[in-house]
Image: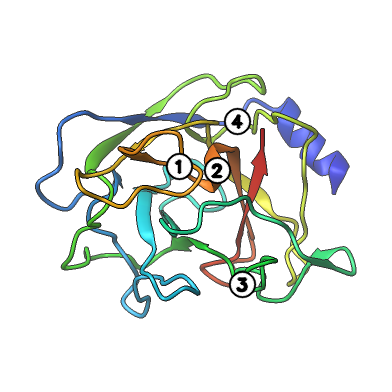
Amino acid sequence: MFERNARRMRTVLPAYEVEVGTEPLVRPARNSVGGWPFLDQAQDWPECFCGERMALFFQFDIPWDLEPFGGDHLLVFHCRAHNDASDPQLADGRLVPKYWDASQPPYPAPFWRVLIQSRAALPDSEAEPSLCALPLALRPFVDTPATQTFKVGGTPSWAQDPEYYRCACGADLVYVCQVPEGMDFAVYPGQPEQPYSVRADTYWLFLGNEVYLLACPARCDPAAIWPVNQH
């Protein structure tokens, strides 16, 4: 597994920098911060274990040349009220069964939901109420292992030692997307302040850590994605 991942990192892979626009969205867009989530028909808007509906932080269509998820739709939700780091739960060298629903001590379940869906054709009727709806643009660029930016594809620029995980189904998770450390997501005026954040007008993902999304290439579940946190 580790040799295969090392070979991937030595290869120049297609990559796209994800740029956040400044003009507020007034209608659904598939590539957005906040906005109207494009969910598969059978997928409800995720809720945290606390009962609060999770906030849609961002979503976009994965470019077609980024295997094995090209053409799919990525959505990242996170609870506003629970701002913490992820903690992998392992069993026999793999992430535990249904790790996307497994406990996150001291919490009984995760406070996030990351989805990769292939049949997300229509937007939800309701927009994300907390985060400002802004467009995203995906622009090809030449990536390097040292490039710490908001990107999809390419190679992860690890802030610490590389981390590799095996899905409960037996497949080695593959890198999909990276969110840089301290990235601010603007919120609408009057929203509750996020715990452990540094500004009242922005929210963070996973305490503002560098986030690396690793997904199951066997597609055993739309939520079979692990968010690695480093700083």
Q: Which residue is mark 4?
A: 13
Image spot of residue 30 (x, y percent): 27, 50
Q: Is residue 38 left or right of residue 199?
A: left
Splitting the image into 4 quarters, where does residue 148 fall?
Answer: top right
Q: Which residue is mark 3?
A: 220
Mark 2 crowdedness (10 Å alpha carbons): few <14, some 14-19, many ≥20? many
Say which element carries label 4. loop
Q: Which residue is mark 1?
A: 204
> Does 37 appear above or below 61?
below
Mark found first going from the N terminus, 3 or 4: 4
Q: Which labelled disc corresponds to residue 207?
A: 2
Q: Which labelled disc corresponds to residue 31?
A: none
- Please report contact status of discs 2 and 1: CB closer than 8 Å, yes or no: yes
Residue in the picture at 67% in, 66% down: 104
Viewer-nearest of labels 1 and 3? Answer: 1
Mark found first going from the N terminus, 1 or 3: 1
Amino acid at dot 3: Cys
Residue in the picture at 67% in, 23% down: 145
Tell me the quarter of the image containing the C terminus: top right
Residue 177 in view of the camera: no
Mark found first going from the N terminus, 4 or 2: 4
Mark 4 crowdedness (10 Å alpha carbons): few <14, some 14-19, many ≥20? some
Viewer-nearest of labels 1 and 4? Answer: 1
Image spot of residue 14 (x, y percent): 53, 31
Mark-to-mark CA distance, 2 and 1: 6 Å
Mark 3 crowdedness (10 Å alpha carbons): few <14, some 14-19, many ≥20? some
Say which element carries label 2. helix
Mark-to-mark CA distance, 3 and 4: 24 Å
Count of marks overlaid on the render: 4
